[in-house]
Amino acid sequence: MDDLATLLAARLGVERVERLTRLSGGASRETWRFEADGRARVAQLQRPGDQRDMLNEAAVVRLAGGGGVPVAELLHAERRDDGSAFMVLEAIEGETIARKIQRDEEYTDARTVVVGQLGAALARIHALDPAEATGLEPVDQISFYTDVLDDLGQPHPVLELVRRWLIDHRPATVDQRVVHGDFRLGNVIVGHDGLRAVIDWELAHLGDPMEDLGWLCVKAWRFGQRPPVAGLGEYEELFAAYEAAGGRRVDPDVVRWWEVLGTWKWGIMCILQASAHLNGAVRSHELAAIGRRVCENEHDLFLALEGRW
C-alpha cells in the first residue's frame, strides 16, 4: 500500500496521498479511493495477465469526456514495467447500486429524469468519432459468445435455440460506432439530481449503437422492477431522449433484437462465471450463486421470443 501511495503521489505531482482505501477486487482490476492533497481521487489498477488493455479504456474515457459524455476526468494513465496499466480519475460522488437508485427516497427526483439523461448520454457516446477511438475493435457478439459457450462444453438447448433465432433475425449491418458495451445501472453514477457519470468502459468496442440501448433494457438489469428501461422508465422515453440528443432514429424492433441478444449473452456469462468457481480458478460464493441465474435467463428468453416480456 505504501508503494502504491508513493507511485500515485509521484505521478500526480502531489505532496501527500492519504486515506488509500481498497474499494473492490474484480477479476481484472483493483479499485482504490484516496485523497491527493485533500482532493478525492480513484485509481484503477489492471491485473497482470488481463488481455484487455486499460490504456485503451483510458483513451476512450478521455475521448468521451471531450465529446460531452458525463465521465470522471482522467488525470493520469500509464503502463507499468510488468505490462499492466493503471489510471487515475477524479472521484464522483453518487450511487451505483441499482436497488438504491430505484427505491431510495434520496433519488426520488433523479428517477424522474435519469432515463432521459441515459438516452442523451448514449447519443453522445455514439456520436464520438470511431477513428479517434484508438485501440477499439469491432466485436461480433454472436460469434464471440458462441465461441465462449462452445469452449465451456455444456449443453444448453435453450441458448442454442435462441442463437438460431438471433442469426435468422439479425438486423442489417450499420456503420460501426463507439459502443460502451456494458451500459446499465451499476456502471453509472447517479446523484439526487440524476446522472453524474458513465463509468467502467473496459468492454468498449466498435459496433451497432443499438447494442447499448438493448443492453440497458435487458430484464436482468431491471432488478425486479416493471419498467423496461433499467426498472425506471419506458422505451418511448429512452428512444425520444436519444433521438432528441442527436442519436439516429430508433427502430424498436432492432432494439428488441439486441435486448434478446443481451439476455442470451448474460446467460452465457452466468455459466462462465459459475464455471470459474466450479473448476477452482476462483473460489467464490458470489460466482457460484450467479450460476443459478442461468435458468432465469432461459425463462426470460422464452418469454421474449413469445413477445410476453
Image: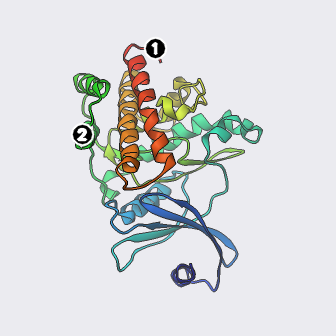
Q: Is residue 256 visible?
A: yes
Image quarter of the N terminus: bottom right
User: Looking at this view, is 67 or 37 the one in front?
Assistant: 37
Quarter assignment of residue 237: top right
**Where is residue 95 shown, x and y percent of the image?**
65, 49
Badge 2 amino acid:
Gly
Left or right: 153 in relation to 243:
left
Q: Nearer the viewer, mark 1 or mark 2?
A: 2
C-alpha separation, residue under disc 1 versus residue under disc 2: 30 Å
Residue on which disc 2 sits: 153
Residue indicated by mark 1 = 308
Q: Is residue 213 visible?
A: no
Q: How crowded is mark 1: few (under 14 residues within 10 Å), some or many (20 or more)?
A: few
Give me the residue at 54% from left, 39% from top: 118
Task: Answer few, some or many: residues within 10 Å of disc 2's Cα (few below 14, many 20 plus, some between 14 and 19).
Answer: few
Element assignment for label 1:
loop
Residue 217: give x, y in percent of width and height.
48, 31
Residue in the picture at 41% in, 58% down: 60
Counting residues from the start of the chain, the first of labels 1 and 2 encountered is 2
Is 224 displayed left or right of 138 in the figure?
A: right
Q: Which amino acid does label 1 sit on?
A: Arg
Q: For this rendering, which residue is in front, 120 or 38?
A: 38
